[in-house]
Amino acid sequence: MTLYPINAGNFKLDGGAMFGVVPKSLWQRTNPADSNNMIDIAARCLLIEDGNRLVLIDTGMGDKQSDKFFGYYYLWGDDTIDKSLKKYGFHRDDITDVFMTHLHFDHCGGSIQWNKDRTGFEPAFKNAHFWSNENHWKWATQPNKREKASFLKENIIPMEESGHLKFVGLPETDILSNSELGFDIFFANGHTEKQMIPLINYKGKTIAFMADLLPTAGHLPIPFVMGYDTRPLLTLDEKEKFLNMAADNNFYLFLEHDAHNELITVQHTEKGVRLKETYTLNDL
C-alpha cells in the first residue's frame, strides 16, 4: 500500500466561523487571519494505492460553480486534483473508488463535473464507485435549513443517477471494522450526520483522515469547535474520545483543511491532548 497527498485546491474561510465561540485572541495564535478575518484552508485529499485499487478520499470543491460562488471563498494557489494526480503518475480515470467523508460541497464537489456541452452533470471519475452511507445520504438529500447551502444537489444527485453509488455499512458502535474499502471507519455525528473518518493501517501505523472532526491543528483543544457543526456539544464528546484514542495509540492524523500541517501526532498533557510532532507522508 502507498499513500499520496492530493491537494484539490486552497481557499479561505472566516476565522470566527471556523472556531465558533472561541475568541479570536486565542485562535489567531495558530491560524492567523488576514484583514478580512479569513484564514488559510486546504482541500487536502488522500489517495490510497492498494493492489489494483485506487481509492481517493474526498475531492474538494471542484470547478463547476459560478465565479460568484467561488468569490466567497477567496481561492488561492494553483493546486488541482489533476495536477496532484499527475505528480504521482496517475489520471482521474485510474481512480476505482471515491470515498466521501461527507457530502458538504468542499468535500465532494470535485466528484461531479459539467458534461461536454454543459447541459448537465456527470461523474468526474468515470471508472469509480462513489461511497457514502445510507444515513448521511438521506440527511444530505433531505437537508435541514442549517446545512442546505452546503448540500448542493448538483454535487450529489448525479452520483446516484450514474449507477455508481455505493453505501458502506453502519456499525453497532462508533467504529466499522474491515470495511469493503480495506480500512476501518470512525463515525462522528457532531459536524453532520454520520461523517466518516477513515482509519488506515499503513506501514504498521494508523493514519486517520480527520475531515471535519479536526479541521486544523489549531482545533486540538476540545472546546475549539467550528460554528459549522450542527451538534457542537456532541462534537466535544467525539473529539475528546477520538483524540484520547489517538494519543493512547500514537495515531498519525492527516489534516484535510490545515493549509500548513499535513500530518500530526498528539500527546497527553496537563491541558489535555495537544500537538506532539508534525510530519508529511514522505516522512513515513
Image (cartoon, rainbow, N blue to C red):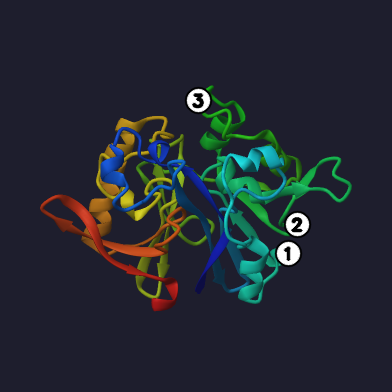
**Percent position of residue 105, x then y:** 59, 41
Query: Is disc 1 in contact with disc 2, using a CB cutoff of under 8 Å?
Result: yes
How many numbered tags mark residues here? Answer: 3
Please tell me which residue is depicted at 70% across the width and 44% down the height of the picture. 159
The image quarter in which residue 217 lies: bottom left
* Residue at the disc numbered 2: 126
In the picture, the quarter occupied by the C terminus is bottom left
Left or right side of 105 for 261: left
> Where's residue 171, x and y in %?
42, 43
Q: Return the mark for residue 93.
A: 1
Disc 3 to disc 2, C-alpha distance = 32 Å
Residue corresponding to mark 3: 146
Compared with 175, 228 (above or below) is above
Name the residue rendered at 56%, 41% in the picture: 103
Q: Nearer the viewer, mark 3 or mark 2?
A: 3
Q: Which mark is residue 186?
A: none
Residue 78, image x and y in percent? 62, 62
Quarter residue 98 falls in: bottom right
> Which three-letter amino acid code belongs to the residue tagged 3?
Arg
Q: Is residue 253 left or right of residue 113?
A: left
User: If you read the primary sequence from the N terminus, does the residue marked by circle 1 or circle 2 appear first?
Assistant: 1
Which percent across, then down, holds residue 193?
Answer: 46, 34
Q: Amino acid at mark 2?
A: Lys
